[in-house]
Image (spheres, rainbow, N blue to C red):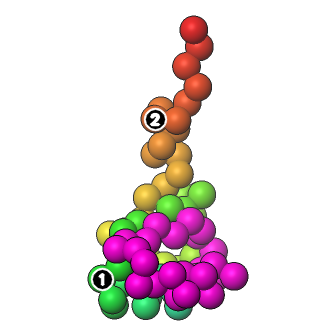
């Protein structure tokens, strides 16, 4: 479904952020990269599909956001 909606909405966004690390969206990530519309690929684990390795410049680990989204105690 993500691939379908990404393509339907393709003219309506400048950059895309894809969340997933298992390679299911490899074709979408590759296409967005070719069209200069890929901003980031957020992966949930340090280990992610070898298919995505060629896009390592776009890869951000979800753990990198931990301090930014951590609930602060009052």
Point 60% across, 82% down: residue: 5
Describe the element under mark 2 as helix, strand or loop. helix
**22 left or right, relative to 8:** right
**33 left or right, relative to 63:** left
**Which residue carries the number 2 mark?**
68
Residue 36, numbered circle: 1
Place residue 46 in its image quadrant: bottom right
Point 43% across, 78% down: residue: 12
User: x, y percentage for residue 16?
Assistant: 43, 71
Between marks 2 and 1, how big is the CA–CA gap?
A: 27 Å
Q: Find the residue positioned furthest to the right.
A: 1
Q: Which residues are magenta?
A: 1-26
Mark sitting earlier along the chain (2/1): 1
Quarter of the C terminus within the rendering: top right
In front: 21, or 15? 15
User: x, y percentage for residue 9?
Assistant: 51, 81
User: x, y percentage for residue 59?
Assistant: 42, 65
Q: Residues within 10 Å of mark 2 (few under 14, many from 20)?
A: few
Reply above or below: 59 against 63.
below
Describe the element under mark 1 as helix, strand or loop. loop
Point 33% across, 89% down: residue: 35
Q: Find the residue positioned furthest to the top.
A: 74
Reply above or below: 48 against 70.
below
| Number of marks drawn | 2
Point 59% across, 58% down: residue: 45
Tell me if I can see residue 56 in this picture.
no
Verify whether residue 14 appears in magenta.
Answer: yes
Task: Select label 2 or label 1 by which is in front.
Answer: 1
**28 left or right, relative to 16:** right
């Amino acid at each position: 479904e993500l691939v379908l909606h990404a393509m339907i909405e393709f003219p309506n966004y400048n950059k895309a952020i894809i969340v997933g690390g298992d390679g299911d969206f490899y074709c979408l990530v590759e296409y967005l990269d070719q069209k200069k519309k890929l901003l980031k690929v957020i992966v949930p684990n340090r280990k992610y599909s070898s298919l995505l390795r060629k896009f390592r410049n776009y890869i951000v680990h979800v753990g990198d956001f931990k301090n930014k989204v951590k609930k602060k105690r009052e």
